[in-house]
Amino acid sequence: MPEQRNRVTLIGPDGRAVSRRVFLKGTLLGAATAGTGALSACMPMTERGIPRNVPKLFALYQDRPNGWERCGRCRHFRAPHGCEIVEGRISPRGWCHYFEARA
């Protein structure tokens, strides 16, 4: 006789069942967002109130552009591979949460 398991089905706001993977991704994203807010409160700031030395993970940095937005077009970009906010080497074709178009 097969063993029976107790299963819990999660229902999303649209009424559809939510997989365990989707639920865990959402939970982890929420925790990361909350951690980013807490971390940014204790980060060093520039004279304009912009955080400095933000880890790529917390800046949501990616090595590809977000539509037309890319690091090479951002006011915080420092050629050839730097940023006044995000720490480490970045790509001019990358993107992060702090993107701000040059004036």
Image: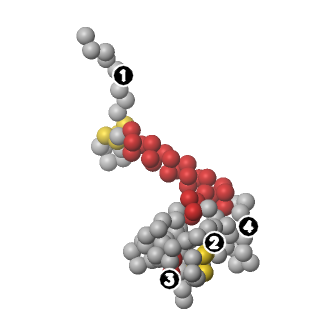
Disc with the residue nearer the chain's start (2 vs 3): 3
- Left or right? Give the position of 23 relative to 55: left
Kindly report the distance in space between the C-alpha atoms of the residues bearing marks 3 and 1: 53 Å
Q: In terms of secondary structure, where does tag 4 sit?
A: loop
Disc 1 marks which amino acid? Asn
Is tag 1's residue or tag 4's residue first in the polypeptide sequence?
1
- Residue 3 position, x and y percent, is 31, 15
Q: Do the CB atoms of the residues marked 2 and 1 lie less than 8 Å apart?
A: no
Q: Nearer the viewer, mark 2 or mark 1?
A: 2
Give the secondary structure at mark 1. loop
Q: Which mark is residue 85?
A: 2
Badge 2 density bin: few <14, some 14–19, many ≥20, Cα 10 Å: many
Image quadrant assignment for residue 47: bottom right
List the residue tagged with mark 1.
6
Tell me the SS state at disc 3.
helix
In this view, the residue in front, 33 or 70, is 70
Q: Residues within 10 Å of mark 3 (few under 14, many from 20)?
A: some
Along the horizontal axis of the image, is 85 left or right of 102? right
**Horizontal arrangement in the rendering, residue 85 relative to residue 74 (left or right):** right
Q: Which mark is residue 39?
A: none
Q: In the rendered view, would you say 48 is above or below 40?
A: below
C-alpha span from label 2 to label 3: 14 Å
Mark 4, residue position: 44
In the image, residue 13 sits, relative to residue 4, either above or below, namely: below
Amino acid on which the number 4 mark rests in the picture = Pro
CA gap, disc 2 to disc 1?
Answer: 48 Å
Check residue 73 in the rendering and tell me which mark sits there, or answer none: 3
Point out the tag, 4 or 3, that comes first from the N-terminus: 4
Residue at 67% across, 57% down: 39
